[in-house]
Amino acid sequence: MFDLEKAIREWKKGLQSDPALEEGFVAELEENLRKEVRAIARSAEMSKEEAFGRVAAEMRRPADVGAEFRKVYRSGRRQLPTRRAGFST
């Protein structure tokens, strides 16, 4: 049986492995993912598994998200943010 929380944790691990993505950004993406999955599952009468697959695909792979973040961030600044020591998830 599909476990939405487990799927989200696995998806989130991919984002957290990219040092360019700050924790706040990862949390915001997770919140957006959850909202979209709920909305699609209700309105489109999809299972949570189908809705998660659809939303995750639309948001792209975690590695792609990190790459896009770096492109945008580099256009405005010279250095990427780094995670502070002592803050882990």
Image (cartoon, grey):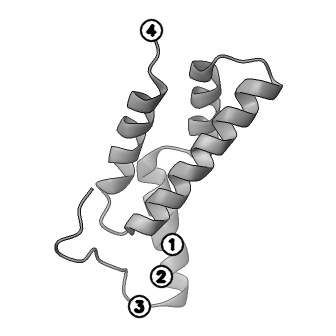
Q: Relative to 82, is 5 above or below?
A: above
Give the residue type that dot 2 points to.
Answer: Arg
For image coordinates 33% across by 45% down, the residue present is: 13
Residue 75 falls in image quadrant: bottom right
- Compared to residue 23, the image places residue 82 above or below, namely below
The residue that mark 2 highlights is: 74
Under tag 3, what secondary structure? loop
**Of marks 3 and 1, which one's residue comes earlier in the chain?**
1
- Callout 1: few (<14), some (14-19), or many (20+) C-alpha neighbours within 10 Å? few
Image location (x, y in percent) of residue 72: 55, 75
- Badge count: 4
Task: Name the image quarter holding the C terminus.
Answer: bottom left
- The reply to whether residue 44 is visible in this rendering is yes
Check if mark 2's residue and mark 3's residue have beta carbons within 8 Å.
Answer: yes
Name the N-terminal-most of marks 3 and 4: 4
Q: Name the residue under label 3.
A: 78
Identify the residue position indicated by label 4 in the image.
1
Q: Quote the CA–CA distance across marks 4 and 2.
A: 42 Å
Where is mark 1, residue-wise? 71
Q: In this view, does 42 lie above or below 60?
A: above
Q: How far apart are marks 4 and 1 (CA)?
A: 38 Å
Looking at the image, residue 59 sits to the left or right of residue 46; the answer is left
Between 77 and 31, the one nearer to me in the picture: 31
Please tell me in which quadrant of the rendered image residue 6 appears.
Answer: top left
